[in-house]
Amino acid sequence: MAIKALYTAHATSVGGRNGHTQSADGLVSVDLSIPKAMGGPGKPHTTTPEDLFAAGYAACFGSACEFVSRQMKLHPKSITVRSAVSIGEAPGGGFGLAAELAVEIAGVSQADADRLVAAGHEVCPYSRAVRGNVDVTIKATAV
């Protein structure tokens, strides 16, 4: 499926998981280090690709939920998305990812929160990109 690009982000990484990555505009500029839990040095004041993915997925999913809430004529007071992205050994070899999204929606019923999050998961570009490749667990909570 080809998309009609509305925006394109550019970034460069040097040194892989123990290097540095930066967006073309320099707004994202971080040093990376493999965590000790994965056998790496776990250098202080560094991040991981999974941290960056978790932050992006949370932001994108929140926007998708805001988008569908307008379509559904719901008016939540706020939408908060907490994400957890794990990396581990995949069945059959190599590595895989898993993601958990905890979505708190203020000002709607639990039934509406569930419907909104399900609809958000269908339109979110990150959810669409990982569908069938990454185990994603989503929990909606009306607050």
Image (cartoon, rainbow, N blue to C red):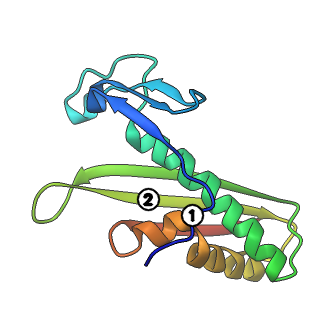
Q: Amino acid at mark 1?
A: Ala
Q: Give SS at disc 2.
A: strand
Crowd tier of the residue under label 1, counting other residues whose Cα lies within 10 Å: few below 14, some 14–19, many 20 or above: few
Which residue is situated farthest in the left direction here? 92
In the picture shown, does residue 38 fall above or below 9? above
In this figure, which residue is indicated by the disc labeled 1? 5
Q: Nearer the viewer, mark 1 or mark 2?
A: 1
**Left or right: residue 143 compared with residue 1:** right
Q: Amino acid at mark 2?
A: Ala
Residue 8 placement (x, y as % from top left): 55, 52
In this figure, which residue is indicated by the disc labeled 2? 99
Residue located at (19% from left, 30% from top): 39
Residue located at (58% from left, 69% from top): 124
Between 10 and 62, the residue placed more toward the observer is: 10
In what quadrant of the picture does the N terminus appear?
Answer: bottom left
User: Which of the 4 image quarters holds residue 79?
Assistant: bottom right
**Left or right: residue 34 compared with residue 115:** left
Residue 41 placement (x, y as % from top left): 25, 20
Label 1 vs label 2: CA separation?
Answer: 26 Å
**Left or right: residue 27 compared with residue 78:** left
Q: Give SS at disc 1.
A: loop
